[in-house]
Image: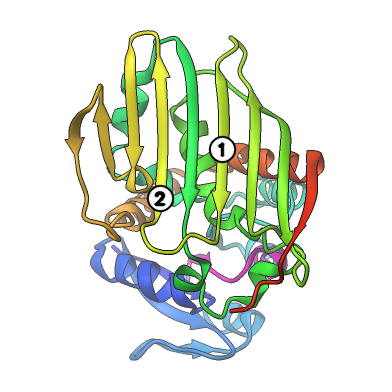
Amino acid sequence: MALKIALAGIGKIARDQHIPAIAASPDWELAATVSRHASVDGVPSYDDFTAMLAARPDIEVVSLCMPPVPRFDYARAAIAAGRHVMLEKPPGATLSECHALEAMARQAGVSIYATWHSREAAMVSTAKTWLAGKRLESLVVTWKEDVRKWHPGQTWIWQAGGLGVFDPGINALSIVTEILPDPIHVTASDLFIPENCETPIAAHIAFAHPYGAKVSAEFDFRKEGDQFWNIEITTAEGSLVLSEGGAALAIDGVVQSATAAGAALTGEYPRLYANMARLVRAGGVDMDLAPMAHVADAFVLGRRIPVEPFIE
């Protein structure tokens, strides 16, 4: 029997990814939406989350797709009402609130899932398997995209808690923390912050690796033309390049798989929802916060560098 789910926050990511993934899955029935400004044809809609929870005790799961800052209050209300919770990335605005939500969910006996959609990209698991047991020499992340194309009108991303360029950058970090066999940590970061914004438009990060490998990341929201979502890895036993956000892979220069430009998200959200269905039915919790810890450390250690104002 399909699980009934409510989708809260009907913005671009919900329409582009969540709604199609739910509609295509036998595990789920989209039973309600919550938004002050949008709805989905044929689906009961609410403009108040608390009212939806009270009116629909039949809905077992809530998927939260609004920006990270208000998400905690929604998740807390859902858990208090005995509902399982699925969190769009990043799972919250701070690490502390995410730890609090996990504790609440465990106490209430409900599932909670901090999703990292890029971990579900087509070639990430293959890269992880190839790296196992190899000696890392270097890893370079290059994540450059045009914010005007991918986040049009999303003013919240430039406000405190919105993460700025780390909103896509955290996707790269979710892959890195998934595929590397050894943990890394941030040692330095440069944050390039527009004069009229509170969050960075670009960032350079250096990491420490336990065996001395050179690890770095470069994120930039100002890239016009070709877009880059690449992770280049060199080991003592060979090299690997993940591109298209993890959807394409080359090992020692030999292409293992390729995905057309712009199609990197294909399959990621269906796999997230399959994961959530299994988690709910098993009564499990998945709140891995490793990617978010790196972002928090980059902000703590970050050298703020003012740049020209961002005008959309």
Q: Secondary structure at mark 1?
A: strand
Q: Residues within 10 Å of mark 2 (few under 14, many from 20)?
A: some
Disc 2: which residue: 228
Residue type indicated by callout 1: Ala
User: Quarter of the image holding residue 213?
Assistant: top right
Q: Secondary structure at mark 2?
A: strand
Q: Which mark is residue 130?
A: none
User: Which contiguous range is marked in magenta?
Assistant: 60-75
Residue 228 place in picture, x, y as percent: 40, 50
In the depicted view, which residue is nearer to us: 185 or 292?
A: 185
**Residue 74 counted in the magenta span:** yes
Q: Residues within 10 Å of mark 1 (few under 14, many from 20)?
A: many
Disc 1: which residue: 217
Residue type indicated by callout 2: Phe
In the depicted view, which residue is nearer to us: 137 or 58?
A: 137
Q: Residue at x 18, y 33 (%)?
A: 256
In the depicted view, which residue is nearer to us: 20 or 253?
A: 253
Residue 79 place in picture, x, y as percent: 64, 61
Residue 221 place in picture, x, y as percent: 55, 60
User: Quarter of the image holding residue 47?
Assistant: bottom right
Q: As displayed, is residue 91 above or below residue 39? A: above
